[in-house]
Amino acid sequence: MTTQIIEAKKGKITAPMEYIAQKEGIEPEFLRGKIAQGRVVILKNNRRTDVVPTGVGEGLSVKVNANIGTSMERSDLETELDKVKIIEATGADVLMDLSTGNDIDSVRKRIIASTKLPVGTVPMYQAGKEAFDNFHDVGRLSKEKLFSDIEKQCKDGVDFITVHCGVTKFVVEQLEKQGRVTDIVSRGGSMLACRIKATGEENPLYEYYDELLEIAREYDCTLSLGDGLRPGCGSDAGDRAQVAETMILGELVKRARDFGVQAMVEGPGHVPLNKIPSMIETIKVLTDYAPLYVLGPLVTDIAPGYDHITAAIGGTLAAYHGADFLCYVTPAEHLGLPDIKQVREGIIASKIAAHAADVARGNKAAIERDYNMSAARKNLDWEAQREYALDKCVFEKIDSGKPCTMCGKYCSMKIFDEYFAAQS
C-alpha cells in the first residue's frame, strides 16, 4: 500500500497534493518536495474518501486542532457531536477524539462519520482505559492489546494518531534522577511510564516501532509522535527528560520517513515566553524539521479560566519561530471538560494566534486578508468586514433571535444560554 510520502519520493503529485497546493496558493511541485523531505504531512487516511486533505508543515499556513471526547464523568455522544458542528463552523482545520468514556469504538465511528475534517485519536487512551477496567492496573496492558487498538482505529479511518513512542526506560530514568514540579502531565505518557515501572519492560511503542510503522503505512495514517514528557509548568520547561525524549523522537522521525510513513512531532506544553524561540528551534533541529504540533504553549501558570489567552500568546510566538500546528486550549484547561461555548472560545483564540503568526511569517493570503479588512473598515463596508473577520458571528444582531448563517444555533451568547438551559 502506498502513502503520500512514498508517492512524493517517486516524484508523483497526488490529488490531495494538488488540492492542498491550490488551497495554500503554492506550486504543487514545491509541496511535493516538502512531503518527500518529511517536512510536510498530509492528514488523510486512505480509507476515508470524503475527508478534506489537510497539509501541515513547512511553507504552509499554521493549522488549528480542537479536542473533543467523552469521559467517565461525562459520556454524552450527542454533546460531542454538537461540538463537531461548532468546530466546523468556527473554522478549526482538524479535530481529535480523546474519548475515555463508554463505548469508545461507537463514539469514534460516529464522530468520523459526522465530519469531513481530518480526525486524530490517542489509541493509548482506549487501551489503557480497558486495561484498567479489566485489571484495575494499567501495568497489565499487553503489547498485543495496544497494537490491536491502534490497527482498529486506523482501519476505522483515523487520519493521524498520537503515539508516545519516546517515553522509554531511559527517559523515565532521566525524569526520576532529575525530578519535576509537576511530574508527567501527559495521560498517555503517564500510562506508559506506569507500565515501564510495573513490568520493567521497554515501551512497546518504541520496542516494536517497526510493527507500528507497518500499520501506519497500510492506512497512510500519520504518526503524531507524542511528547509524553512535555512540561506541565513553566518551571519544568526544557528539562533533561523533555530533551531526552525529543532526541528519541528525532530518531523515530527518520525511521518513519525511511519506511514510507508520514510523521510529525508534538511539543510543549507550558513554556515561559522568553524560552519559546530557542525551544521551538531546538525541537525543529533535533527532529530534522518535522512538522511540529504544539499545545499552547502556555506562557504562565496562574490563569485558570483564561488559559485560551495564555496559550494564544505562546502559540503566536511558537508558530512564528517554526511551529506548524496549534492544539487549541480552552478556558476549561486545568478546570474540567470544556462545554460547547468554551470549545468555540478556544478555537477562536487559537485561530487568532495562527493568523497572527502567518502574517508575521509573510503568508501572502494572511497579509491580504488583513489589508482587505482595513479597506472595508475605511469604507464602512460591514458586509466585507464580516467576510474577512475570523469570527463572523460578531456581526450578527444578538437580539434578533435569528440563528447566524455561519454556525446556526450556536452563534450568540443569547443562543448559547438557551442551549444550556435546554440541557439542564
Image (cartoon, helix red, strand yellow):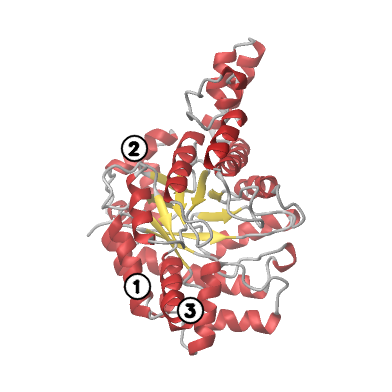
- Secondary element at tag 3: helix
Q: Could you tell me how far apart the alpha carbons at marks 2 and 1 are, in whole angstroms?
A: 32 Å
Q: Could you tell me how far apart the alpha carbons at marks 3 and 1 are, in whole angstroms?
A: 15 Å
Query: Is residue 310 visible to us here?
Result: no
Q: Residue furthest left?
A: 1
Figure check: 97 above or below 181: above
Residue that mark 3 sits on: 138
Q: Nearer the viewer, mark 3 or mark 2?
A: 3
Q: Nearer the viewer, residue 278 or 198?
A: 198
Q: Position of residue 361 (x, y in %)?
A: 59, 40
Q: Residue placed at 66% from the left, 56% from the top?
A: 335
Label 2–label 1 contact, CB within 8 A: no
Q: Position of residue 330 (x, y in %)?
A: 61, 48
Q: Nearer the viewer, residue 95 or 165?
A: 95
- Secondary element at tag 2: helix
Label 3–label 1 contact, CB within 8 A: no
Residue type of the residue flagged with mark 1: Phe
Residue that mark 2 sits on: 19
Q: Nearer the viewer, residue 349 or 284?
A: 349
Residue 147, label in figure: 1
**Mark 3 / mark 1, whichever is N-terminal:** 3
